[in-house]
Amino acid sequence: MASAFGHFGRRSIQFTGFRRILHYDPCNVVQRSTSEIRSFHLNRNVDASIPVAMPALSPTMTEGTIVKWHKKEGDPISPGDMLCDIQTDKAVITFDIEEEGILAKILKAENSKNVKIGSMIAVMVEEGEDWQNAEIPESSESSSEASTSSEPSSAPSAGEPTARIRMSPAARKMMEEYNISSPQTVPATGPHGMVNKGDVLKYIQTQHLTKIDLRKAAQVPPSPQKSTPTTPSTPTSSPVTRVPPSITVSPEGGYQDIETTNMRRVIAKRLTESKTMIPHSYVSIECKVDAAMKLRKKFIASGTKISMNDIIVKAAGYSLQRVQKVNSHWSGDSIQIQPTVDISVAVATDSGLITPIVRNAAELSLSQISSTTKALAVKARDGKLQPQEFQGGSFTISNLGMFGIGEFSAIINPPQTAVLAVGTSVLKPSAEGKPCSYLTVKMSYDSRAIDETEASQFLEKFQQVMENPSLLMV
């Protein structure tokens, strides 16, 4: 027994010396391995999670409201599926997801308001993963704050292996389509360094890459080519009915609180910026519209219903083709003459003013303009406009004549450089003493892009065609 204790003591001394030589304690290997395995499984749950952020569904959108979820937790999701309805600053648009997997957690419930763009609204996992125990990744804001507060870590040495780059399924597919062989070249903005679809789209745009034919690529390895920049595709939208603003009555009485919609907030912000930042100038002209009224009656008698506003849109398109400086955008310090005449027509809705676009108005007939404006007006009031139907435009017309307004000044809708305000027609004696109908229009224009001569030339052409509408039939 004594020899056994002596043998154990000698082995203990040798083992203690061995630990000093190795500079670590082999007795802690099992304990460390257990904690590392536990940490591995926890990190695996986080890595398997795919964050879904609030998308930007319009160029002016900064925040949105979750109106309705079309999917519930545990539902499978395929690219192109309708995920949820989001009220933007313009309309209620359905967000179609581009990822594939299972919806694990909904982080923003229905009627969640003022959700900032980029904020996480849901979490997905890949098929086959445990969606019920999916971890919520850290938001980009918290991760960025953590990275700025922490000290910069030392760069890995050449002998150390590089960490695996995580990509969403949609990002991986897009990299294959655009022949991006190295994911390290794409700056990642997703949680835990994940490369998402938006990162790849931005990289494609900056590098001017073109899409390749994957069937041909299987036979001949393609090389990256540079071409005309491709614009990232906007989310496909399926419109739904706009949610009306809620009204609350003050308990003290005497007034009502009407909740401001995102649309009205954006309108207020943009109009304030336009009025304060754009040097507005004004010019007006009076048009004799008896001939235009007779033309309208002829169309109605033949079974084609058109309005005076349709004739005004056509006349504006005719004038914009001949004074192209007015058909422009102001960009930075330059004037961009637009290639087509796309006229935005202001339509009043319960949520605010929206301007659906009559594309290529100068080339359309009066009957085509009439059917187009009617359809757009109905969709605007029902909140069913598609993004491409109200985003863009080269010139705006705002008509308050149906309300009996004789004359008013409109505010320019940037980046456009002009807007035409149309009042009602009034009966006045002409120079010959005969009663005639006169219409007053006033154009607000950006004096940085348009001077007084060009503005006057535009209104001169407009007056000419309104008083001689037969020019529109040529």
Image (tube, rainbow, N blue to C red):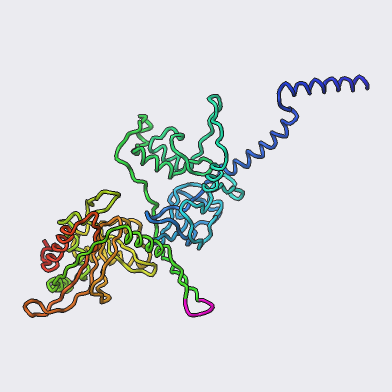
Question: 122 or 72: which is nearer to us?
Answer: 122
Does the rendering let one see residue 367?
Answer: no
**Residue sitting at 35 percent across and 31 percent down?**
223
Percent x, y of residue 462? 15, 64
Q: Identify the image quadrant of residue 318.
A: bottom left
Query: Residues in magenta?
Result: 250-255
Magenta stretch contains residue 254 = yes
Residue 440 visible (yes or no)? yes
The x and y percentages for residue 473 are 12, 63
Point 71% across, 30% down: residue: 29
Residue occupying the point 57% across, 40% down: 150
Q: Given the current orientation, which residue lies at the most extreme right position?
A: 1
Total labels drawn: 0
Report the side of 449 relative to 188 (left or right): left
Q: Quadrant of the N terminus?
A: top right
User: Is 117 in the magenta?
Assistant: no
Q: Is residue 435 left or right of residue 48?
A: left
Q: Position of residue 466 (x, y in %)?
A: 14, 67
Q: Position of residue 219 (x, y in %)?
A: 36, 30
